[in-house]
Amino acid sequence: MNVSVVFLVVGGLVGFVIGRVSKKTSAPFSDFSNEELSEVHRASQEALTARTALRKDEIVRMMDEAVERHEELKACGLAGERKGINRKDVEDLLGVSDRTALKYLNELEGSGIIRQVGVSGKNVYYTLVGDVEQVAGDSV
């Protein structure tokens, strides 16, 4: 039998035993009162809300830069069709999952800060509401 297979089996068994023993002996929040738990929950919600607001601000900042870049390229005759950012841009900027990026974009759109151009797929991008030029064929 291969040595690495033996180590894998033994390691799995040791992990299983430790997990079973620790389940019986620990209750992670049992030492806290309901008031303390409520305070921890409130503080974590505030921190999450603050982080989300900062991330949305970063998306809007990136969109401002995209508009400036597009205008510069347009002045040089090099501008493409896309005038905003897409979900992948947000993922890369913030280091978040596609679902989280889409959540932020949907919240910004719901707040009236940005507008989705395109219906679905790779051609969808988002623009700042104040910087959108209405072009025939744009779909919301």
Image: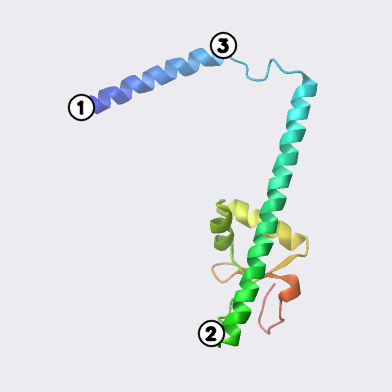
Q: Position of residue 37 (x, y in %)?
A: 74, 25
The residue beneath circle 2 is 78
Q: Nearer the viewer, mark 1 or mark 2?
A: 2
Expressed as whole percent of the image width and height from the top left, the position of residue 69 reads 60, 75
Tell me which amino acid carries mark 1.
Asn
Distance from Cα at disc 1 to Cα at disc 3: 35 Å
Number of labels in the image equals 3
Residue at the extreme left: 1
Q: Residue at x 26, y 22 (%)?
A: 6
Q: Residue at x 73, y 29 (%)?
A: 40
Residue 46 as seen in the image, left or right of residue 103: right
Q: Are marks 1 and 3 in contact (CB under 8 Å)?
A: no
On screen, residue 28 above or below 99: above
- Left or right: where 93 falls relative to 114: left
Cα separation, mark 1 vs mark 2, equals 61 Å
**For the residue labelled by badge 3, is the local secondary structure a helix, a strand or a loop?**
helix
Whichever of callouts 1 and 2 sits on the residue coming sooner in the sequence is 1
Q: CA distance from mark 2 to mark 3?
A: 66 Å
Residue at (76, 73) in percent of width and height:
130
Residue 118 horizontal/vertical position (percent): 63, 72
Q: Amino acid at mark 2?
A: Leu
Q: Is residue 120 left or right of residue 32?
A: left
Amino acid type shown at disc 3: Thr
Mark drawn on residue 2: 1
Q: Nearer the viewer, residue 109 or 53?
A: 53
* Residue under label 3: 25
Look at the image and tell me in which quarter the C terminus lies: bottom right
Q: Position of residue 9 (x, y in %)?
A: 32, 23
